[in-house]
Amino acid sequence: MNKELIKAWFQASRPPFYVATIIPLTLGWVVAGEAGSWHPWRFVLINLAAFMVHLATNLANDYFDHLQGTDTGASIGGSRVIQEHKITPETLKRVIILLYTGSFIVACYMMNTYQVWGLAPILLFSFLSSLFYVAPPIRYGYHGLGEVFVGVNMGPIMVVGTYWVIAGHPGWSPFYLSLPIGLMVASILYYQSIPDIDTDRSVGKHTLAVRLGKERAITGLFRLWLAIYTSIIALALSGYLHKFAFLSLLSLPILFKVIRLARQATDIVELDSYGKYVRILYFFNGAVIIAARLLCSFLP
C-alpha cells in the first residue's frame, strides 16, 4: 500500500474522532472496575469491536451520501475521498461489509464467552442505527433524528454496554453517568451539520440545523451545553461523581468562544473549522467525568 493510499484511508476513517468512542467505553470500564471487575482483555475486545463499527459508520455515511448526491458541489460534509477520487465507492462498500462482519464476530464471541446475551437486541439496534443513519430506506439522519440516535448509541448504549460486558450485568449508575456523555457526542454531530445547512437543504436532508436555521441552531447549541453542564453538576450533587466534576465549569469560556465565533463566521469553511472547539469541550468534560468517577472510589 503506497503512501498516498494510506493518507486516503486515514482521511476516510477520521481516526481523531475515535475520541468520541473511547470516552464512553472508558467510563463504563471505570464504573465496572470499582467492584474489582477490570478485565482488561474484555476492554480490549470491546474497543476492537467499537472501533470497527465506528470506522464502518464513517465509511457508510460517505458511501450512501455519495449515492444520494449529498456530498457533491459546495458541501463540505464527509471525508471527500470519493469526490476527490482517492477511493472508489466499490472499494468502500467492500471494506464496510468487512468491518461490520468483523465487529459481528467479536460481539458474538464476547456474548457467548461472557454469557451476556441480553446485549443482543441492544447491539442489533446499534448496528441498524449505524447503517441506516443515511442509508435508504430509513435515512433517519435526513429527518432530524441524527443527534437523538447518536446520543443514545454513544451515551447509554456504549457506557452501559461496556459495563455489562465487564461486570457481567447491567446497572443504573452507568446509565445515569452516560447521559451527559450522550448529549456531548450529539452536540458534535449537531455542530457539524450547521455549516452544511444550505447544501443539506438543497438535497432534502432535513437535519435539525436545517429545520432551525443558522442563528437558532447556534442558540440551540448553547442551550444544549447548558443542559450538559447542569447534568454534570446534578450528578456531582447526587453523589454519582466526586465534587471534582465542578471543574467542568472551567470549560465555559470555550463554549462562549465557539458560540461567538460561529455567529461571526462569514463562510461555511470558517464555520466548519470552529467545530474543533466543540470536540475540545467534549474531550475535556469527558475526561473530567471519568476522573470524577474514579475519585469517588478513593476520596470522600
Image (cartoon, grey):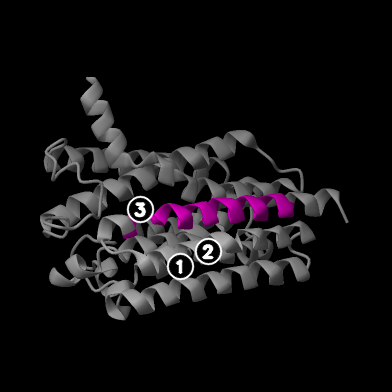
First in sequence, mark 1 or 3: give its number.
1
Task: Say what amino acid the circle numbered 2 marks.
Answer: Leu
Q: CA distance from mark 2 to mark 3?
A: 15 Å
Cβ atoms under marks 1 and 2 closer than 8 Å: yes
Q: CA distance from mark 1 to mark 3?
A: 13 Å
Q: CA distance from mark 1 to mark 2?
A: 6 Å
> Residue 161 or 16: which is nearer the viewer?
16
The residue at 63%/35% (across/down) is 40
Q: Residues within 10 Å of mark 3 (few under 14, many from 20)?
A: few
Q: Quadrant of residue 270?
A: bottom left
Left or right, 94 with reference to 48: left
In the image, the segment drawn in magenta is 271-293
Q: Read off the residue under disc 3.
A: 273
> Residue 244 or 122: which is nearer the viewer?
244
287 drawn magenta: yes
Give x and y (percent) for residue 71: 17, 56
Q: Is residue 230 above or below residue 11?
A: below
Task: Say what amino acid the circle numbered 1 marks.
Answer: Ile
Give x and y (percent) for residue 26: 60, 46
Residue 255, disc: 2
